[in-house]
Image: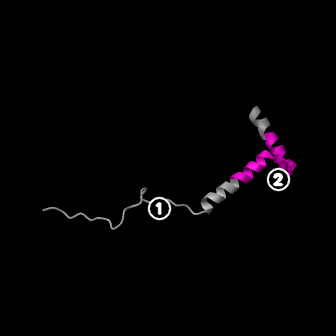
Amino acid sequence: MSAHTHTRPHPAPRGGVDTRLPWWALALPTLAFLALLTLVLNPSDAHATAGEPAITHLVERAQELIAR
């Protein structure tokens, strides 16, 4: 006795999953990359780096301790 096989009513997608992305899934990482790239290329616009000297002092102390 042979078993009946079930056929699909429509062909399955290639990857087995629908692989389309929403527009923001590409736009947001691109925007973040461009913002970081602009800060790297023109660090004078990065106002956060001109902040407290305490952070600079802390980093210098850490470097001194590592160098020992």
Identified at 74% across, 53% down, the residue is 35
**Magenta residue span:** 33-61
Q: Residue at x 74, y 35 (%)?
A: 66
Residue 53 point in image, percent of width and height: 87, 48
As rendered, which of 13 and 49 lies closer to the eye? 13
Q: Is residue 49 magenta?
A: yes
x and y percent of residue 44 in the render? 85, 48
Amino acid type indicated by mark 1: Asp
Left or right: residue 53 versus residue 13 is right
Q: Horizontal placement of 9 versus 23: left or right? A: left
- Report crowding for label 1: few under 14, some 14 to 19, many 20 or more residues within 10 A (C-alpha): few
Q: How is the image coloured?
A: one colour
Q: Which residue is mark 2?
A: 48
Return the x and y of residue 56 as percentages of the image width and height.
Answer: 83, 45
In the image, what residue occupies the spot 78% across and 37% down?
63
Q: Quadrant of the C terminus?
A: top right
Which residue is rendered at x = 18% and y = 63% of the image?
3
Question: Furthest residue to the left?
Answer: 1
Q: Which mark is residue 18?
A: 1
- Residue at the bottom extreme, as displayed: 9
**Magenta region includes residue 34:** yes
Q: Tell me the CA gap for discs 2 and 1.
A: 42 Å
- 33 w.r.t. 8: above or below: above
The one nearer the camera, 31 or 9, is 9
Amino acid on which disc 2 is placed: Ala
Q: How many marks?
A: 2
Tell me if 2 is positioned left or right of 66 in this view. left
Q: Secondary structure at mark 1?
A: loop
Q: Residue furthest top?
A: 68
Vertical position of residue 12 compared to residue 45: above or below: below
Secondary structure under badge 2? helix
